[in-house]
Amino acid sequence: MSLLVTGSIGIDTVKTPFGVSKDCLGGSAVYFSMAASFFSPVRFLGAIGADCPFDLKKIFKGKKVDLNGLELRHKSKTFRWAGSYQGAMNEATTDAVELNVLAENPPQMPEEYKDSKFVFLANTAPILQIQLLDQLNRPKFVAADTMNLWINNNLADLKKLLKKIDCLILNETEARMLASEHNLITAAAKIEKLGPTVVVIKKGESGSIIRQSDGQLFVLPAYPATIVKDPTGAGDSFAGGFMGYLAGQNKTDFATLKKAVAYGTVVASFTISDFSLKGLTKTTRRNIDSRLNELRNRVKF
Amino acid sequence: MSLLVTGSIGIDTVKTPFGVSKDCLGGSAVYFSMAASFFSPVRFLGAIGADCPFDLKKIFKGKKVDLNGLELRHKSKTFRWAGSYQGAMNEATTDAVELNVLAENPPQMPEEYKDSKFVFLANTAPILQIQLLDQLNRPKFVAADTMNLWINNNLADLKKLLKKIDCLILNETEARMLASEHNLITAAAKIEKLGPTVVVIKKGESGSIIRQSDGQLFVLPAYPATIVKDPTGAGDSFAGGFMGYLAGQNKTDFATLKKAVAYGTVVASFTISDFSLKGLTKTTRRNIDSRLNELRNRVKF
């Protein structure tokens, strides 16, 4: 089933204890699409400036990623992010950010994208997420990401968005902040009262939680990765694996949601194994399935 | 099979966002014994002073806890700890501590305890843990807890202890510190090189990891508790459920170790549901088994 992602394409500079990756490809839509393409065709919506050194057609060659929604703006500059990780690399420190094209109008939605049934609105101002969503005709399952900035500064917009989506994917700090609640299970239940019937809380190296408003709950540790070089893109890759699997199955019952969380977890474990897109591009669906089985066995008792 | 615990009996004062519990019963040996007694008889070794307001015989009435090793020292005072928890209650702040009887010689090991096959050395100075262990005749499976204080200040003693035990149970911060390694799986493998064939890393609300030196690995999220009033004793209850199950089964193969971790997790979830021993004493083996099945289903996909 059709899967649309709207998000960023970034020129990233990342420092971790394992090295520096300068001016490498990043951005939420890029990580998401690469991850989701293992499971489903993807419709890509995003904008770059004239300075973008990456040929996305080449990068997604052989992958089922429709780039008709990739907008090149000749007078703009591409989004840039520089960040660093230390110690256990649980959180990035943003060293520099240039919004550039992300501060302009969102990209034009191609006509043929408007019937998309599965939709992921990557993290951006909730007002823009609403504008993008409002251009679509009756999507079946809409998930969105958000961040502390919008929870603190644009809560009214965010609450409007939450009434329009099916699923919110966010990290544990954001979940606690949005729900004003420390207990993550209770926080998920409180967030559901704001709109989404499904809440996914990402806990980094400690795994994730998914809760549905009927009370169904699934908890999963992260894949126990020993090779972790660069956590950038882990969250968007998780979302890509999750939404890609749902779209591929064209189902959103709880059994499918659980398996989608497991696929998201496993796909993210490939992302973090190397810098930029390298860990993700060099893997295969077969490797992903093999790690899924390994994870299933690791939690069995 | 016989299970011995050596540890503390404490007079605790605990503050959490849910209230204050003044001069209540605590201590590692107390939590451990109560938790383990659901699975196996327990031999209790510990000392109290003349000021101890608790009648442990009454508290353990009907439980298979042998109190022959409980030493009352008329000229001493009982160990006291005051601590508080805030926010997500992941870590206790120690507000006051009086070692009292814990700063004296360790309690006398009763002759009939010396053939104990399963042994848990709760957290104390590693030199004392070694002294206690050296009084035993060929135990089958010895587990110990430790803490940052000994890792920082008594590392040589701790390394001597590690060569004498089968299993180290510690929290994630301690594991990273002891192994000088951020990745917890790698940290567990490094700790095994120091002696123990089994390493259990407790991650609080994020569950636990168990690794065996042959490379076998099991990861489990915590039981998704929504009622968390007082985390005091969670770690010792976990150890009690874990060791109690192993002793009850008289087995230490990896399948049994995994199930023991799951029982430890579930028993700890009862401990944290109320202040002091209340959550643990009001539950039953039947409730524990029902929660174990629930946890098994929560991680299945």
Image (cartoon, coloured by chain):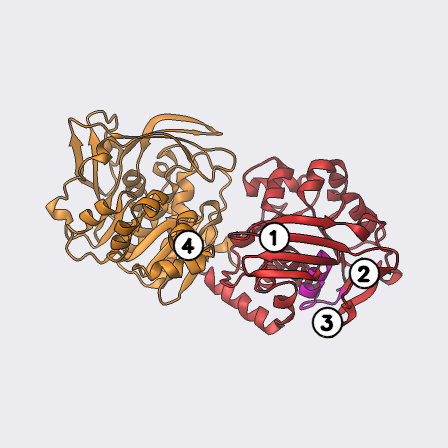
Chain colours: A orange, B red
| Pointers 3 and 4 within a single chain | no
- Per the rendering, the mark at residue A97 is none
In the foreground, A153 or B195 = A153
Residue B102 visible within the image: yes
Image mark 2: chain: B
Looking at the image, residue B76 lies above or below residue A124? below
> The C terminus of chain B appears in which quarter of the rendering?
bottom left
Dot 2 or dot 1: first in sequence order is: 2
The structure residue drawn at horizontal position 27% and vertical position 35%, both measured from the top left corner, is: A9
Mark 3 vs mark 4, foreground winner is 4
Secondary structure state at the residue bearing disc 4: loop
Amino acid type at circle 2 is: Asp
| Pointers 4 and 2 within a single chain | no
Are the residues tagged 4 and 1 within 8 Å (C-beta)? no
Q: Position of residue B51 (x, y in %)?
A: 81, 60
How far apart are labels 3 and 4 at the CA level?
41 Å
